[in-house]
Structures are given as structure tokens and as C-alpha cells.
Amino acid sequence: MDKRPKRRKSKDNPYTIFEENGKFYVVFKDGQGDENKVEVNNDVFSLFNDNELHDISQLNEFDRHIEHSEQSEITLHKKTLSDNIPLEDIIISKIRNGKLKEMLICLSLLQRERIILFYWERFTCSEIAEIQGCTRQAVSLSIRRARKKLKEEILRRENL
């Protein structure tokens, strides 16, 4: 009987190799699902054995080093928002956010409302249009014009 320890196999490995009474065999299923047992020489057996060992190595690498949880946009986003963000960056972001809110004063009331709904509340243009009783195109154009005004205001303040 085979003296080698029982090995786990990749699900993609269609064959089994073993040694019996000094002879080497490869067992596999053909296209009709019938099991075939073929005697092979030592060189062919060694090639199959090396391939199996390589598969096991790959399986072990996968088990040890590759994350097995299902990755989705939500889980990846949560990972990017982990506590690895330096405190200084968080503070700078809050200050910039506050300054940006101050700059909203340069916008009309309608543009300000649409910018807040779009960027802070994460509504789509279609949702804002439905809330305000207008077309999506009107909202989109208003937001584009508001962004242009904000950009001009930012550049004006930087040049002061």
C-alpha cells in the first residue's frame, strides 16, 4: 500500500496518485464519469507527485495569508475609515469642512440648499428635484454653478 501520508487536494485536482506493491498508479474519472486506474512509470508518478505538492503549497499559502471574508464595497469602505487616520488629518479635515460651510454664504439660498443636500446629505440630483418639485437638469445645473462660485471664492480667499 501507499506509504505517503494522506494529502488534502485542491478541488480542481481531478486525479489521485498512489503506490501499490511497488507499482505507481494514477486514478481519474473520464468524461462519462467512469473511474480509470492507469499504471505509470516512476518519472510520470514523480511529476504528478510534484504537482500535488505544489497544489498543497498553494492551498497552505492561501490559508495562511489571504483573507477569506467576502469583500464588498461596504466592508472595504469601512476598512478605509479605520482608526489609522492620524489625528492631525482629522482636525485639518474638520477645519476645512468648517471653512467650506462658511463659504456657502456666497451662494444663493437655493444653491446652498442643493449643495448641502447633494454633498452632505448624499441625495442624488433626481431625489433633490423630487423634493423641490423641479427637474433633475435644473438641480444639476444649479450644483455645477454653485461649485464654480465656490471655486472662485476659494481662490479669492487664498489670494488674500
Image: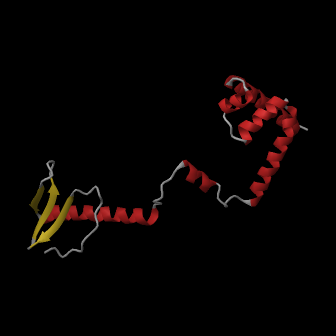
Can you say which quadrant of the picture contains the C terminus? top right
Residue 1 to residue 71: above or below: below
> Would residue 46 be found to the left or right of residue 152 on screen?
left
124 lies above or below 46:
above
Residue 102 vs 125, above or below: the answer is below
Q: Residue at x 81, y 34 (%)?
A: 112
Tell me how the rendering is colored.
Answer: secondary structure
Image spot of residue 53 (x, y percent): 28, 65
Residue 64 in the image: state x and y as whole percent: 43, 66
Location of residue 149 by image quarter: top right
Q: At 72% from the left edge and 41% from the top edge, which residue is drawn?
A: 121
- Assign the N terminus to one quadrant of the image: bottom left
Q: How many numbered marks are there? A: 0
Q: Residue at x 19, y 65 (%)?
A: 46
Q: Nearer the viewer, residue 2 or 113?
A: 113
Give coordinates of residue 102: x percent, y percent: 86, 41
Residue 109, visible in the rendered structure: yes
Q: Is residue 153 left or right of residue 70?
A: right
The answer to whether residue 47 is seen in the rendering is: no
**Residue 12 on image: x %, y %:** 28, 55
Q: Quadrant of residue 19?
A: bottom left
Q: Residue furthest right?
A: 160
The quadrant in which residue 144 appears is top right
8 with respect to 46 (left or right): right
User: Seen in the image, is 87 located left or right of residue 13?
Assistant: right
Query: Camera-side residue: 50 or 98?
Result: 98
Q: Which of 29/50 is in front?
A: 29
